[in-house]
Image (cartoon, rainbow, N blue to C red):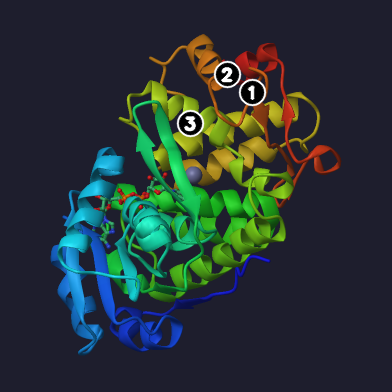
Amino acid sequence: MLDTTYRVHILPGALDAVGGVARVAVRAHRYAIVTDSNVGPLYGERVREALSGQAADLFTIPAGERHKTRETWAAVTDRMLDAGFGRDCAVIALGGGVVGDLAGFVAATFMRGVPVIHVPTSLLAMLDASIGGKTAVDTPAGKNLVGAFHQPAAVITDPGVLATLPVEQYRAGITEALKHGVIAEAAHFDAVAATAAGIDRHRPDARAISAIIARSVEIKSAVAYGDYRESGRRKTLNFGHTIGHAIEHLSGYALLHGEAVAIGMCVEAEIAERVGVARAGTADRIRAACAAAGLPDRRPMDLAAEAIVAATHGDKKGRAGRAEYALPAAIGGMAFGDRGWAAPVDDAVVLAALA
Ligand SMILES: NC(=O)c1ccc[n+]([C@@H]2O[C@H](COP(=O)([O-])OP(=O)(O)OC[C@H]3O[C@@H](n4cnc5c(N)ncnc54)[C@H](O)[C@@H]3O)[C@@H](O)[C@H]2O)c1
Ligand SMILES: [Zn+2]
């Protein structure tokens, strides 16, 4: 039986409580704080100080998805070994989803597995990547192809650090929160849409965004742990991602994941209406919410629809070369519950939805 029980602390100022939480959750003799070159200078010392006297070393990796690799994993584990870290250590992942995935994989593999505490600092990491226990690195063959399931001992989320997050990264997190609303709860979708509207002019207030993070965490946990690993209901979390991944890849990663998935949600909701599983107007509501948050709601016109369809066939979620889709029945609920929560769709329908 896998132990998937851990606490998620969401509170402005929670960064300063890392020491107390770590003492209760893992009782390690030494901590490896893994962070990146943007987040480290902003919050690294603060977290080290919060550990108040418990031994801790800071390991800083270069920021960015292109460093989420086996090479970076090797560099971090080598440096930990050089510094004399042993079985009695724990990893603290301080950063966005890239740090979370990489440091999580370090923790999953170092000495055959040591505890990890996630301290997510991007909105996407707070409401999505830090929950569920997936860790991975990318390889030249694709994203997240080498990794492990490794549940955190605790998650410490301080919405106060969002003050320094670039607005386009903030928006990218909003996409996944909207997705949680579509797959599980219309009221959450409406709350996220209202909070994110006009995000260019003013950042959401701490209380509103804390509530959104908390609800998204509950939804993702219920879906991820209600059905552990990639079978069944967990597939609904892929809503927007079959088209989204294809567009993200074809754009040469010029589009952020959250931007590509926003387009993916709009297109896949359109597909859902066209195949007759979604209530009319579902796609319009998603497009309106994306537009109000400053997220793209249609494919970039320089990406041909045919190329996007072809790219979906390479998606690792597809079976036997046919792309599978998790599609909404309405805002707040997903279709295909009677057949594993995803189904293949004819290319012609996908092309029409992209047109
Ligand atoms: N494990 C999962 O279940 C899961 C789920 C979703 C996404 N992911 C992974 O997460 C990654 C994307 O995460 P991301 O969007 O957080 O990207 P990221 O980690 O690259 O962070 C985005 C950028 O924001 C910076 N940043 C983060 N927090 C900051 C802060 N508070 N202030 C200033 N700058 C800050 C980072 O340095 C980086 O430049 C991808 O690799 C994706 O595969 C994993
Ligand atoms: Zn995503």
In the image, residue 306 above or below residue 28 = above
> Mark 1 or mark 3: which comes first in sequence?
3
> Mark 2 or mark 3: which comes first in sequence?
3
- The residue closer to the viewer here, 269 or 222, is 222
- The residue closer to the viewer here, 345 or 84, is 84
**What percent of the width, then of the height, locates residue 213?**
49, 66
**What percent of the width, then of the height, locates residue 145?**
45, 36
**What percent of the width, then of the height, locates residue 123?**
39, 59
- The residue closer to the viewer here, 181 or 34, is 34
Task: Kindly identify which numbered label has been placed on residue 313.
Answer: 2
User: Mark 1 and 3 residues: CB-CB less than 8 Å, in contact?
Assistant: no
Question: Which residue appears at 64% of the width and 19% of the height?
Answer: 350
How many other residues sit within 10 Å of disc 1, few (<14), some (14-19) or many (≥20)? many
How many other residues sit within 10 Å of disc 2, few (<14), some (14-19) or many (≥20)? some
Q: Amino acid at mark 2?
A: His
In the image, residue 301 above or below residue 334 = above
User: Helix, strand, or loop for circle 2?
Assistant: loop
Q: Is residue 65 visible?
A: no
How far apart marks 2 and 1 lie (CA) works out to 5 Å
The residue lying furthest to the right in this view is 338
How many other residues sit within 10 Å of disc 3, few (<14), some (14-19) or many (≥20)? many
Circle 3 residue: 245
Q: Amino acid at mark 3?
A: His
User: Mark 2 and 1 residues: CB-CB less than 8 Å, in contact?
Assistant: yes
Q: Report the side of 330 relative to 42 (left or right).
A: right
Q: Indicate the quadrant containing the N terminus: top left, top right, bottom left or bottom right.
A: bottom right
User: Helix, strand, or loop for circle 3?
Assistant: helix
Circle 1 residue: 323
Q: Is residue 276 visible?
A: yes
